[in-house]
C-alpha cells in the first residue's frame, strides 16, 4: 500500500464509529518510528505540537478513542442482555446522564405494554427503586407529569378504536395547538397529556389521521415548538420514521458522543422488531441505504456487527 | 386470615350439576347456591364455571344474573367472578358512577392490592372493556383528583422493604410544607404518595408523625373538604393500615340508616379469602360485638345468609 494510502487508512481507522482493528494491526503494527512520526506530525486532529518539541496526543481524542474502542464491546453486551435489563439500564442511564428526555420517551413509547412492564420489573431488580419514582424525583420541569406517565403506561393493545372519540380528540388537539402561542404551554395542558399518555397506539394513529383531515397538517409537525410532545407523538404514531431520523442525525460528522450512542441503541433494540421498515424509511427519506451509510461511517468489528444486525431482515 | 370455609376436594362436575338443578324450574333454590358457591375458594369456583360451561354451554355467572335479584344477585355475581375480573368490574362501576366517580373504591383497589394483583386487574380490565383502566379513569376525572387517581392506578411500586431514612425525613418535610402552605394539590405530595414504595411511604409518614406531632391525615383537611383531599386521606389510610380502613368502611356501612350494601358486599367478598378474620377481630374490639351479629341485624333474606356464610358461619 502506498504511504499516503496508509496514512489515510490509519486516519480513517481512528475516525468515525468504532476502530478498524485490521488496519491498525496490519499497517500501524509494521510502521517504523519515522513513519509513526510522520503520522503524528501530519494529523493535526489527533496530535498537538508541544512546546517542548514533541507531538502529543490530544487528550480529547484519547478519550474519544476510548469510546470508539469500546463501541463494539458496548454493542455486544447490550445485544446479549435480556431485553428487560437492556431497557431498564437505558432508562437509568438516560436519567443520570442529562437527563436525556428523548431516550426516556423513546423507550417508554416504542415498546409494547408487556415489554415496558418487563423493563419496569427489571428496573426494580437492578436499582431497588421503581422507574416512576426515579423519574418523578429526577425530573423537575413541566415535562415531569408527561414523563412519569409515559414510563408508567400500560396501554390497551387490542384492535378496538372508537372513531368518534378519536375524531373529537383530534379536534380538541387542533384547537389546543392553535390556542397555545408557540406551543410553550401545551405540555402543561392536562387534556393534551391525557390523550397522549393513556390512549392506545391504534387510537392515537386514528387521532393522527383525523388531525390531518381537520387541520391539513401532520400532528407532529404542528408540535414543532414542544420537543417532548413532538417526540412522544412520533414515537407512538410513526416510530420507524422517528428512528430513521435519529439515525441520520447521529451519523453526521462531528456529533457528540451522546448522539453517537443512539446508533448502537437503535440498531440493537430494533434489530428484532422493525429494522426492515426502518431501512425502508431511511432509504426513502435520505436516498441512501442504511447499510451503505453504516459502511461509510463505521469501522472494523463494530461496523461488521451493526451490518449483521441490520441485515437480519425483520 | 380467611374466613371462607371450603372442602378439600369437591367435585366441580357435581357442583355444576347441583347449581344447574338449583336454577331450573320455576323457583330458584337460593340455599343450594349459597351452600355451594359460598363454600368454594377462587380456584374451585373457576373449575365449577368451566365444568358448567362444558356441560351446559352457558356461562354460570350469566345464569345466576338472570335467576337472582337485588343485593343478593350482585353479591353472588361478584363473588363468582375471578378476583381480578371482579376488581376490574368494581373499578369500571366506580369510574362510570354518576354524577361523580366513586373515588373511594378506586383508591381502595389501587392501594390495597399487591402490585402483582393490580397488574392482573388492569389486564383483566383491558380484556373486559377493551380500554385501559387508565384511559377510562383519566377521561372521567380532572385536575388534582385525576393526577392522584391515575397515579395510584398506574404505579408499579418497588416492593422491597428497605427504606432510606434521610429521604423519609426530607420527604416528610416536603409534605409538611405542602400542608402548612395549604397547597394540598402540591405536585410533590402526589409524587411521594403515588411513586414511592409502600415501605418508604410508611417511613415518611412515621417521620411526619415524629417530627410534627400528629398523623398526617389530621392535617389534610381544607376549608372546602374536596374530593381530592378525601381521596388522599383514603389512600394514606389504605397504605398504612388497610385492616383498620376496612373495619371503618364496614362499620360505617352498617351504621347508616339503611345499610350501604355495596360497601358491605365489597369488603366481605374481597376479603373472605384473605383476611376477613382480622377485620372481624378489629370490629369486635372496636364495637364490642361480633361482625356477624351486626350483619345479621342489618341485612335480611338470602343476602344475609350469603354474607354470613362467607363470614365463616358453620352450617
Image: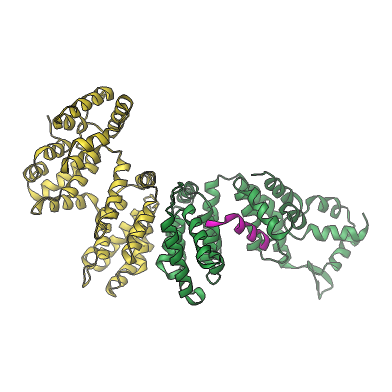
Chain colours: A green, B yellow
Image x and y of residue B174, in percent: 34, 69
Q: Residue at x 30, y 57 (%)?
A: B202
Q: Nearer the viewer, residue A143 or A82?
A: A143
Q: Is residue B22 left or right of residue A6?
A: left
- Asked if residue B174 is positioned above or below residue A263 in the image, the reply reads below
Image x and y of residue A211, in percent: 50, 63
Quarter assignment of residue A289: bottom right
- Asked if residue B37 is positioned above or below residue A250 in the image, the reply reads above
Q: Give the magenta part as a residue range.
A: A236-249
Q: Residue at x 46, y 56 (%)?
A: A151
Image x and y of residue B54, in percent: 33, 26
Q: Is residue B36 left or right of residue B190?
A: left
Q: Residue at x 16, y 49 (%)?
A: B250
Residue at far right of view: A2
Q: Is residue A107 left or right of residue B96?
A: right
Q: Nearer the viewer, residue A9 or A116?
A: A116
A61 falls in the magenta region: no
Q: Residue at x 85, y 50 (%)?
A: A26
- Asked if residue B299 is positioned above or below residue B33 in the image, the reply reads below
Quarter assignment of residue B17: top left
Q: Nearer the viewer, residue A120 or B71?
A: B71
Image x and y of residue A125, in percent: 46, 48
Tell me the quadrant of the picture where the N terminus of chain B can be found.
top left
Amino acid at each position: 500500500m502506498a504511504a499516503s494510502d496508509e496514512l489515510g487508512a490509519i486516519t480513517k481507522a481512528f475516525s468515525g464509529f468504532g476502530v478498524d482493528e485490521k488496519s491498525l494491526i496490519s499497517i500501524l503494527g509494521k510502521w517504523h518510528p519515522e513513519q509513526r512520526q510522520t503520522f503524528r506530525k501530519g494529523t493535526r486532529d489527533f496530535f498537538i505540537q508541544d512546546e517542548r518539541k514533541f507531538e502529543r496526543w490530544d487528550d480529547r481524542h484519547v478519550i474519544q478513542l476510548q469510546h470508539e474502542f469500546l463501541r463494539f464491546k458496548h454493542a455486544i453486551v447490550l445485544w446479549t442482555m435480556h431485553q428487560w435489563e437492556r431497557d431498564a439500564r437505558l432508562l437509568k442511564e438516560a436519567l443520570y446522564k442529562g437527563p436525556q428526555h428523548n431516550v426516556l420517551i423513546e423507550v417508554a413509547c416504542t415498546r409494547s405494554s408487556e415489554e415496558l412492564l418487563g423493563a419496569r420489573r427489571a428496573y426494580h431488580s437492578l436499582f431497588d427503586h421503581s422507574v416512576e419514582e426515579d423519574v418523578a424525583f429526577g425530573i423537575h420541569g413541566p415535562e415531569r407529569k408527561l414523563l412519569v406517565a409515559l414510563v408508567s403506561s400500560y396501554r390497551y393493545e387490542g384492535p378496538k378504536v372508537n372513531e368518534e372519540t378519536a375524531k373529537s380528540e383530534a379536534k380538541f388537539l387542533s384547537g389546543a395547538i392553535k390556542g397555545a402561542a408557540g406551543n410553550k404551554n401545551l405540555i402543561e395542558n392536562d387534556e393534551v397529556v391525557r390523550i397522549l399518555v393513556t390512549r392506545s397506539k391504534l387510537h392515537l394513529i386514528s387521532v393522527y389521521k383525523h388531525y390531518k383531515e381537520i387541520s391539513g397538517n401532520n400532528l407532529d409537525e404542528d408540535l414543532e415548538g414542544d420537543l417532548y410532545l413532538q417526540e412522544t407523538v412520533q414515537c407512538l404514531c410513526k416510530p420507524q420514521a422517528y428512528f430513521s431520523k435519529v439515525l441520520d442525525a447521529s451519523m453526521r460528522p462531528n456529533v457528540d458522543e451522546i448522539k453517537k450512542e443512539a446508533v448502537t441503541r437503535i440498531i440493537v433494540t430494533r434489530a428484532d422488531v422493525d429494522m426492515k421498515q426502518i431501512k425502508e424509511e431511511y432509504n426513502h427519506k435520505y436516498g441512501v441505504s442504511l447499510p451503505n451509510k453504516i459502511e461509510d461511517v463505521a469501522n472494523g468489528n463494530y461496523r461488521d456487527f451493526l451490518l449483521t444486525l441490520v441485515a437480519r431482515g425483520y | 386470615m380467611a374466613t371462607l370455609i371450603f372442602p378439600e376436594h369437591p367435585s366441580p362436575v357435581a357442583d355444576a350439576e347441583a347449581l344447574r338443578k338449583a336454577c331450573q324450574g320455576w323457583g330458584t333454590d337460593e340455599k343450594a347456591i349459597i351452600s355451594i358457591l359460598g363454600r368454594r375458594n377462587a380456584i374451585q369456583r373457576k373449575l365449577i364455571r368451566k365444568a358448567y360451561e362444558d356441560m351446559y354451554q352457558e356461562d354460570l355467572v350469566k345464569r345466576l344474573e338472570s335467576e337472582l335479584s337485588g343485593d343478593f344477585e350482585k353479591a353472588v355475581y361478584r363473588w363468582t367472578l375471578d378476583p381480578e375480573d371482579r376488581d376490574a368490574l368494581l373499578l369500571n362501576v366506580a369510574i362510570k358512577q354518576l354524577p361523580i366517580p366513586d373515588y373511594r373504591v378506586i383508591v381502595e383497589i389501587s392501594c390495597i392490592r399487591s402490585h402483582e394483583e393490580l397488574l392482573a386487574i388492569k389486564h383483566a380490565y383491558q380484556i373486559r372493556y377493551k380500554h385501559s383502566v387508565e384511559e377510562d379513569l383519566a377521561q372521567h376525572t380532572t385536575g388534582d383528583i385525576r393526577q392522584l387517581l391515575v397515579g395510584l392506578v398506574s404505579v408499579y411500586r418497588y416492593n422491597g422493604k428497605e427504606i432510606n431514612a434521610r429521604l423519609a425525613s426530607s420527604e416528610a418535610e416536603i409534605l409538611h410544607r405542602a400542608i402548612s402552605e395549604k397547597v394540598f394539590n402540591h405536585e410533590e405530595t402526589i409524587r411521594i404518595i403515588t411513586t414511592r414504595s409502600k415501605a418508604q411511604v410508611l417511613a415518611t409518614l412515621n417521620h411526619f408523625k415524629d417530627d410534627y406531632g400528629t398523623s398526617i391525615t389530621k392535617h389534610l383537611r381544607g376549608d372546602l373538604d374536596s374530593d381530592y383531599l378525601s381521596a388522599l386521606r383514603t389512600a394514606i389510610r389504605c397504605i398504612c393500615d388497610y385492616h383498620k380502613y376496612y373495619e371503618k368502611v364496614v362499620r360505617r356501612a352498617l351504621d347508616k340508616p339503611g345499610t350501604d350494601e355495596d360497601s358491605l358486599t365489597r369488603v366481605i367478598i374481597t376479603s373472605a379469602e384473605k383476611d376477613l378474620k382480622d377485620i372481624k377481630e378489629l370490629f369486635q374490639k372496636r364495637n364490642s360485638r361480633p361482625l356477624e351479629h351486626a350483619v345479621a341485624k342489618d341485612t335480611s333474606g338470602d343476602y344475609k345468609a350469603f354474607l354470613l356464610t362467607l363470614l365463616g358461619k358453620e352450617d
